[in-house]
Amino acid sequence: MKRTVTILVACAAILGGMAVMGQDKKATSDKSITKKIRIGTYDNRAIAIAWGSSKYNPVGQKMEELKKAKADGDTKKIEELEKWGPAMQRKLHRQGFGKVPVDDLLAAVKDRLPEVAKKTGVVAIVWQSDYAGENVEVVDVTVELVKLFDPSEKVLRWTNPEELKKNAPLDLEFIEKNQENM
């Protein structure tokens, strides 16, 4: 009988130990679940400002094309370029003053986005986050994205996230009505 009790106690101890070990594994895996996922976001206005002052902005090239088209008397090309300029300006005003996607502008530096993600420790870079769960940390990567456009000190000041936050994006209707004054 003593032997049976001893065996039962030993089995209970073993099972109890296994249960504790299982809980330790569960606790360890629960800790990994609570590790925050870092998502990078940016202010589209900063990207538009940085792009507008960068080598990626084709305005200079388009102005040369217009000059050449005028010299050549190429009315079709002149008309095309004279439409392009105001359309591009309208688009940049919306991107630089409003809340408008800038994926077309980021395309110029798309191959360098992984280095920004690595440097800032984020797993993704998105324009904005409308919701983030408690296991998600939203990280502003605006400054690092702006740097991809090789900005001047003046552009860095203009695109400083703290400064941009002082002025909310303008309403698109307001931008349209005031296009001439911007």
Image (tube, grey):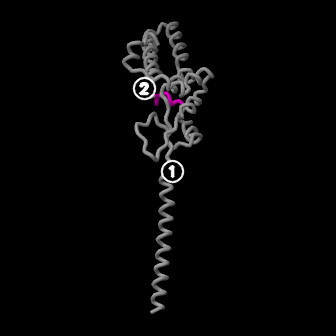
* Label 2 close to label 1 by CB (< 8 Å): no
Q: Which residue is mark 1?
A: 35
Residue 50 visible in the picture: no
Decide which of tag 2 and tag 1 comes sooner along the chain. Answer: 1
Magenta stretch: includes residue 65: no
Please tell me how many numbered marks the rendered image carries: 2
Vertical relation: 44 (above or below) 13: above
Residue 54 point in image, percent of width and height: 57, 23
What label does residue 8 carry, if any? none
Farthest residue, direction bottom: 1
Residue 71 visible in the picture: yes
Q: Quadrant of residue 91?
A: top left
Magenta residues (range) = 102-108
Residue at 53 percent across and 42 percent down: it is: 122
What label does residue 99 carry, if any? 2
Residue at 50 percent across and 56 percent down: it is: 31
Residue 93 point in image, percent of width and height: 45, 18
